[in-house]
Every structure is written in C-alpha cells, then in structure tokens.
Image (cartoon, rainbow, N blue to C red):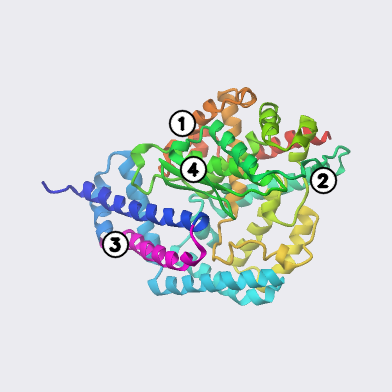
Amino acid sequence: MNQSTEQKFWALLKQQSAYEEAIGLMAWDMRTKAPKKGIDNRSEVIGILAEKVHHIQTSEEISKYIEELKPKADDSKLRSALEDAEETFNRTNKIPAQLYKEFVTLQSSSESKWAEAKENGNFKKFQPYLEELVRYNQRFAELWGYKNHIYDALLHNYEPGVTVKQLDQVFPKVRDALTKLLNNVQLADAAPDPSLLQGHFPKQRQEQFSKEILKKMCYDFDAGRLDETIHPFAIGLNRNDVRVTTKYDEKDFRTAVFGTIHEGGHALYEQNIDPELSFTPLATGTSMGIHESQSLFWENFIARSREFWENHYPLFQSFAPERFKQIALDDFFFAVNEVKPSLIRIEADELTYCLHIMVRYELEKALISGEIKVKHLPELWNEKMKAYLGIVPHNDSVGVLQDIHWAGGDFGYFPSYALGYMYAAQFDAAMRKDIDVAGAVRSGDFQLIKEWLTKHIHQFGKTKKPLMIVKDVTGDGLNPDYLISYLTNKYKGIYQF
Ligand code: ZN
C-alpha cells in the first residue's frame, strides 16, 4: 500500500530526529569522554550529519508535504509540526547558502581570536571580527524580516514571540528594582560568612550527594546518567536518554551541588515531554527562556530555599567533610545565599545575575540597530557595570570579553537568561496557589512538584510557544513583579532590612 502524504511527512521528520540524536550523542561524547585526538575527526562527522539535517529542513520534499497537509491538518500535533517545519524551511531558505558558509567560517576564526584577545585582555584584537559578526547578524535580521525592531528578528531564534517592545517594558523595571535591592543589601548590618564554606570537599562525596539529589528531584536514572565535564550542560537525546553533566571543584562544593541541580532542572523538562511527540522536532523544550526557567526554578527557588536545607542539610553533612557538622544551618543557609556583585556573569548570585543580562541586552540591541559602534563597547560596558553593579572591570578579559556568545555570532540569546528568571518566578507563584510547595520541599518529597511541572509545562514540548505557556499557567503575560517581589522578600528576610 502506498504511504499517505502524512505518513511520508512523519517519516521524514523521524529521519531528521535520527540525525539529530546522532549529532547530540557525539556532541555529548566530545564534551565528556572522547580522547583529545579524536575531536577533529568527530567535528567533521558532526558537520556532515548537520548538512543532512539542513538538507531535509530545506528540501522541496518537505515543502511539498507542508503545502499539501496544511489546509486539512485538523489535529494539534500535526498542525504544530507543520508550523514548525514551515518556519524552519522559510527562515533557513532566506539565508543564501554562500552567505551562511562565510558566516560559519567567520564564526570559527572569531572564536579563536576571541580566546586570544580574552587571554591578553586585548579587545582591539577581537574588534574587527566582532564588527564583521555584527554586520552578518544585521544582514540575517534583514533577510528574516521583522515588524518593529531589527533585534526582534534575532530574538526570535531563541524566544519566539518575544519582542524588543515587550522587553523594554519589563527589563528597565527589573533593572531599577534590583539595583535598589542590591543597595539595601549592601547597607544592611547582617552579613554572611562565606569562609565557612571553604575547605576540601572530596569529589567522590560530591558525586554521591549530586546523585542523591537528582534522584530526589525525580530525575530518572534509567533514562539518563551523570558525568563530569568542564562546562556543564544537560542534553536530551530523546525523552528516555537525557544526560546531565557537572563539574566538581574540591575547594568549592557549590559548583557541583547547585550546578547539578540546575542541569537536573533542564533534564526533567526533556524527560517529561509527551511520548507522542517523540521523533519530531517538537520533542524538546520550547525556548531557551522556558528551559532556563526550569533549571533556575530548581536551582534557586527550591535548592536555595530555607525549606530545602531544613530537610537536606543533614544529608549534605553526611557526605561533607567533618567540619560541616560544626556549622549551624542558619549560617550555612546565609552563606549559600550571599549577595556580592561580581564582574563575571556566570559567578553571579541570584540577585545580581539579571543585572549582568541588562548590560548585555542594552548593548547588543544598540549594536544591532547601529546606535553604537563596536569600538566603543569596552567603555560602554564599564559604564553600565558601574551604574548597575557598582563595580568596574580592571581589564576587558573580565569585562566585555568574558562571554563566548558574541564570538560565536550569537546575538539575541542573552535576554533568555533574564526571561528564565522572570518565567520561573511566575511559575513558582502559580504553583504555590495549587500545591503546598514549601511543605513538599520541607518533607523532601518532590513528586508533586515534578507532576505539576509536567502537567503545566513539560509535556507540551515545543507545541506551545513561550508566552502561551506563561499565559496558560499564570493567566498573565510577561510580568516582572513576581521576580521582583520574590527577590525582595527573600533578601529582606535574609539580610534583615
Ligand atoms: Zn541553564
């Protein structure tokens, strides 16, 4: 019997998923276990498989199926898959192959120039590359098209449906509230003693604790594993194989403990997507921001809460060196919630983190729209750091050169991090209306929380756009008040002002 068009469409998507799973597994291997000498060969293999994916996404074949099926698609899974495939087809085909090839070449040379420039704190070395990367992004944005602001076209790659207009309504509010809150924290009399957390913490015991916590979060070890890496990540190959990686710093347990919980939050999302969506591009998180909301929810709203440590401090102490038995819960809790403006984004605490994002967002938006020039970046960066965080980098390595994103040609990505914080606060407030979150965390039983997240967020994969999930879960649009009041209440309590 001949296959129907719909069957052929699903079969083609399945083929695409198969290539993507192979790429994912190789990428995981490259970042965890692969021998150093194997990397170049493996990168080439990934490149060849990525071409296969690109070929399917931009093929006449898929375009024909979309055209035929779209008018009569009546079930929601098929409709979502068609919309997703059509959008990928249109956006990818808008960029001429030659232009994209040039960009990929520029990306790889820029990353190595950036690494060099960062090492020497020499922005000038990287400047011409960054100027080119900005130009390419501007060209892509023009080709993709936008309604109001050129940056919208780039934002769309990471947070579809969110626009500059929306961000400019909420980000300044967050920025101003957080700078004020930071000021209050700095004026407060109470202060934590972070030196309590120092000491030698054997890797093996950190690993045991990390595994225990992942299990408690309802992370399914029969559908995943935990490995070590340099830059931690989680990766969903399919819902039954979602891997977490972490990093053990024997001098600072926070890296592994909070890092594992963070990646565990990403992993739970991927493990709990509706199995019906398997082998389609819908079987993944819907956006960078929603994904980040899941990791940040577990890392901060749960694992940095007082209730969490009321239950888990004894467990932690059982794996920790002897001296932690002498440290009172209150002191420990205060120390892991220390607020301290830092130059480096990835080392920032929960309160100041979004301020780092504001610096980047404001600058990259102005770069793409042509309001500012690349050569002025270091100066503008330092001005904004001073204004929002009260500190100024002593050189560009710990300033404008610290992140790889721009060197990789990624513009429009940074806002996802701050959006993740805002979404997480909105979801947290909605969840607390439905279930006794504090009680569950205090009892150490996270089943209810996991079920709530699956029901309201995880199961949908990519079938719902980010703001649709926010609307359905909270009845509200993007609203920064939740994050502001969560942080205000928490830090007022801790720092007693
Ligand atoms: Zn993350």
Residue 270, x across and y down, in percent: 46, 42
User: Which numbered disc, 1 or 4, marks the residue that appears first in the sequence?
Assistant: 4
Residue ID for mark 2: 183
Q: Which residues are magenta?
A: 34-60
**Residue at 63 percent of width and 34 percent of height:** 302
Find the distance from the CA under tag 1 to the CA under tag 3: 35 Å
| Residue 62, picture quadrant | bottom left
Residue 101, x across and y down, in percent: 43, 72
Instruction: Report helix, strand or loop for mark 4.
Output: strand
Query: Disc 4, disc 3: CB below 8 Å?
Result: no
Residue ID for mark 3: 59
Instruction: Report helix, strand or loop for mark 3.
Output: loop
Query: Which amino acid type is shown beneath numbered disc 4?
Result: Arg
Find the distance from the CA under tag 1 to the CA under tag 4: 24 Å
How many residues crowd mark 3 within 10 Å: few (<14), some (14–19), many (20+)?
few
Query: Which amino acid type is shown beneath numbered disc 3?
Result: Ser
Query: Which amino acid type is shown beneath numbered disc 2?
Result: Asn
Please indicate, yes or no, whether residue 392 appears anywhere in the rendered image: yes
Residue 61, x across and y down, in percent: 25, 59
Residue ID for mark 4: 225
